[in-house]
Image: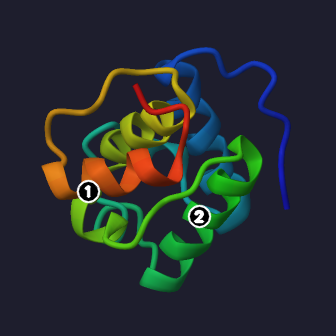
Amino acid sequence: MSRSVDEVKNWMNMFRWIVKLIRDEYGVDETALVRSAVLEKDCGLVIDQVEDLLGIIGESFEVRFPPGTLDEVMQLDELCMVASWLKGLYKCPEFISSAYQERCRAANAGCL
């Protein structure tokens, strides 16, 4: 299900949008949804929920997360930075591998 993304203009807006998504879809208390939160450990999401989360973000922002995303993205802020980069709202995150960067660029025209 896609959600309104009209207010998302930068990675900080993306962070807030994803926090609301996790809170609303998975019932995670917002106090646990800090930037350094590990999606599975700190947020309490199981792998299927993280995959669903990527799907919702992808559909809503019309971006594609390539294979290997869950090997590159562990924390909430990392997810926000990658999603923002895929959409063209943020620079390429320094923490991702060059091979993953190539897969992202091949799948998403908005990557800078």
- Does residue 32 appear in this view? no
Q: Does residue 81 sit above or below 90 in this rendering?
A: below
- In the rendered image, residue 49, in percent from the top left (x then y), is placed at 55, 76
Along the polypeptide, which appears first: circle 2 or circle 1? 2
Percent position (x, y) of residue 40?
35, 71
Between the C-alphas of marks 2 and 1, the distance is 19 Å
Q: Quadrant of the N terminus?
A: bottom right
Please say which color scheme the image uses: rainbow
Q: Is residue 89 left or right of residue 73?
A: right
Please determine whether, in this image, residue 77 is positioned above or below residue 101: above
Residue 68 pos. (x, y %):
31, 71
- Which residue, given by chain and number where applicable, does mark 2 sit on? 53
**Can residue 14 be seen in the rendering of this structure?**
yes
Residue 69 x, y percent position in the rendering:
35, 64
Q: Amino acid at mark 1?
A: Tyr
Q: What's the residue at 36%, 62% (across, down)?
A: 39
Count of numbered circles on the image: 2
- For marks 2 and 1, give the one nearer the viewer: 1
Residue 30 relative to residue 77: left or right: right
Mark 1, secondary structure of its residue:
helix
Task: Name the residue located 29 percent from the left edge and 57 percent from the top edge.
Answer: 73
Identity of the residue furthest to the front in this view: 106
What residue is drawn where x is 38% and y is 34%?
81
CA neighbours of label 1 inside 10 A, class few (<14), some (14 to 19), many (20+) = some
Of residues 101 and 44, the one nearer the viewer is 101
Q: Which residue is mark 1?
A: 100
Q: Is residue 45 above or below residue 5?
A: below
Q: Are marks 2 and 1 in contact (CB under 8 Å)?
A: no
Residue closer to the observer: 98 or 57: 98
As displayed, is residue 36 above or below residue 68? above
